[in-house]
Image (cartoon, rainbow, N blue to C red):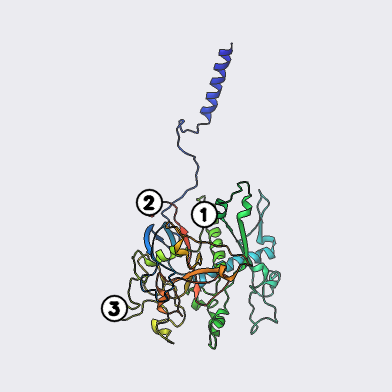
């Protein structure tokens, strides 16, 4: 009797298991119904930088005898990088997205959608905002503008200094989490958030230069269409990070709506990712185009910088130039020397080359508000339109405070490549 019962139980169990096999014939075929993913897709406006090894550090004389960039062999994993610095018009897409999101929430009604499943309120991007004077929408968002007393020459302008126009970005302290001794600590302990005003500081054109008439640049550089394709400046390190965070959410929301796998995070490059990309595959060359000179065989200057004392326009640019001016390096990257210096994600330490790892080196420090100012220094690279040739060298290190905005510092983004090499899929 017991044998009969056991046999019956075995048959039922086998039937259940057969019903759960999902047509895989009982074989190990991996989890099914995974999102689509194509590693061969190059994000718009970016170029692929393959994995490789290079020698970092001064490729020419260390004229300052600073000894902060000794030669060291490093290996870098492949990534995508913007082929130009982020332009005024690209950055404007970011601030207009935030502006329009805030405006729709203030308007309410049809400008907001409610998710039927979760009850969550979302912005209705199909709702057209009527900005015209006297319209109902314009009255609802009146507080977003400067008051009549604060307007200049009667112009109606958005007041970007208001708290509701700030943008909060988030990051996770992966290294702190990895080294946490108390394994029971909540993940929330390693999540950091920061709110920043995202509008570029246009007054840098006046503030950066004493006894110099640059008011037209303050009025027009970021707002006028003539400068749309010029690199954005007046952006702090923190604002650049906020842009990268928004860009990640913006793209991944689109990919998710198409059923595609999410991508890695856009971010600022590490100091050595930047240098590796700037060299364009050339070893020990002082400039992105090789070297050893700042001019080609015809005597033409190869970048936008300050060629001589008081002589800014000889290279073709009085201030900045278009982000895709001059010839790109061998990776297809424009203006990795000159035009504007560029923020990196790396914290500045003059002795960092002595302790960084030789595999994807990275030195981070999340400075607090009450930290000494020396803890708030971030590495900038590439030199700018107002710098001498020394700062254009691929191995030259320099820094700026993370909360400072300058008329000669911009940035570009990188996106880690997921996989061994893009060539695997060609």
Check disc 2: other Cα within 10 Å, few if <14, some if 14-19, many if 20+. few
For label 3, the crowd category at 10 Å Cα-Cα, with few meaning under 14, some 14 to 19 and many 20 or more, is few
Q: Secondary structure at mark 1?
A: helix
Contact? badges 3 and 2 (CB < 8 Å): no
In the picture, the disc for residue 370 is none
- In the drawing, does residue 426 fall left or right of residue 168? left
Using the image as rendered, state which of residue 150 and residue 302 is in the foreground: 302
Evaluate if marks 1 and 3 touch, with contact meaning CB atoms under 8 Å apart: no
Vertically, is 216 above or below 287? below
Residue depicted at x 36% and y 70%: 59
Residue 134 location (% of width, % of height) = 69, 74
Q: Secondary structure at mark 3?
A: loop
Instruction: Quote the CA–CA distance across marks 1 and 2.
Output: 20 Å
The relative height of residue 325 versus residue 22 in the rendered view (above or below) is below
The picture places residue 344, in percent across and down from the top left corner, at 49, 66
Disc 2 element: helix
If you read the primary sequence from the N terminus, does the residue marked by circle 1 or circle 2 appear first?
1
Q: Earlier in the sequence, mark 3 or mark 2?
A: 3
Work out how far the residue at label 3 is from the one at label 2, CA to CA, in angstroms.
39 Å
**On the image, numbered disc 1 is attached to which residue?**
255
- The answer, for residue 199, to whether it is visible in the render is yes
Furthest-left residue in view?
297
Q: Which residue appears at 53% of the width and 59% of the height? A: 248
Residue under pointer 3: 297
């Amino acid at each position: 009797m017991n044998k009969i019962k056991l046999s019956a139980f075995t048959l039922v169990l086998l039937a259940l298991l057969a019903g759960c096999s999902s047509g895989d014939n009982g074989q190990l075929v991996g989890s099914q119904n995974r999102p689509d993913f194509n590693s061969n897709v190059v994000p718009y406006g970016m170029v692929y930088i393959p994995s490789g090894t290079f020698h970092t550090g001064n490729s020419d004389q260390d004229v300052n005898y600073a000894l902060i960039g000794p030669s060291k062999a490093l290996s870098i994993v492949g990534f995508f990088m913007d082929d130009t610095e982020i332009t005024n018009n690209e950055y404007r897409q970011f601030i207009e997205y935030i502006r329009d999101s805030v405006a729709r929430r203030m308007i309410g009604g049809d400008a907001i959608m409610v998710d039927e499943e979760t009850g969550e309120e979302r912005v209705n991007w199909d709702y057209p905002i009527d900005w015209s004077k006297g319209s109902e929408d314009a009255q609802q968002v009146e507080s977003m503008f400067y008051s009549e007393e604060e307007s200049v020459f009667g112009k109606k302008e958005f007041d970007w200094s208001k708290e509701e126009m700030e943008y909060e970005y988030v990051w996770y302290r992966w290294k702190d989490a990895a080294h946490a001794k108390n394994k029971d600590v909540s993940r929330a302990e390693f999540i950091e958030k920061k709110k920043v005003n995202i509008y570029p500081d246009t007054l840098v054109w006046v503030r950066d230069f004493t006894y110099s008439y640059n008011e037209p640049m303050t009025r027009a550089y970021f707002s006028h269409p003539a400068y749309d394709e010029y690199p954005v400046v007046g952006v702090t390190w923190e604002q650049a990070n906020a842009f990268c965070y928004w860009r990640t959410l913006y793209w991944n929301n689109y990919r998710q709506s198409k059923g595609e796998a999410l991508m890695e995070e856009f971010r600022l490059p590490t100091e050595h990712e930047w240098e590796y990309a700037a060299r364009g595959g050339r070893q020990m060359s002082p400039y992105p185009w090789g070297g050893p000179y700042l001019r080609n065989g015809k005597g033409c200057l190869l970048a936008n910088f300050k060629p001589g004392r008081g002589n800014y326009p000889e290279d073709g640019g009085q201030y900045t130039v278009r982000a895709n001016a001059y010839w790109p390096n061998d990776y297809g990257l424009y203006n990795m020397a000159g035009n504007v210096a560029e923020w990196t994600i790396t914290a500045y330490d003059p002795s960092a080359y002595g302790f960084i790892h030789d595999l994807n080196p990275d030195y981070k420090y999340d400075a607090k508000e009450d930290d000494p100012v020396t803890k708030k220094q971030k590495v900038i690279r590439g030199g700018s339109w107002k710098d001498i040739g020394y700062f254009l060298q691929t191995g030259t290190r320099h820094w700026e405070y993370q909360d400072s905005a300058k008329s000669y510092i911009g940035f570009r983004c990188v996106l880690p490549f997921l996989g061994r090499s893009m060539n695997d899929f060609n």
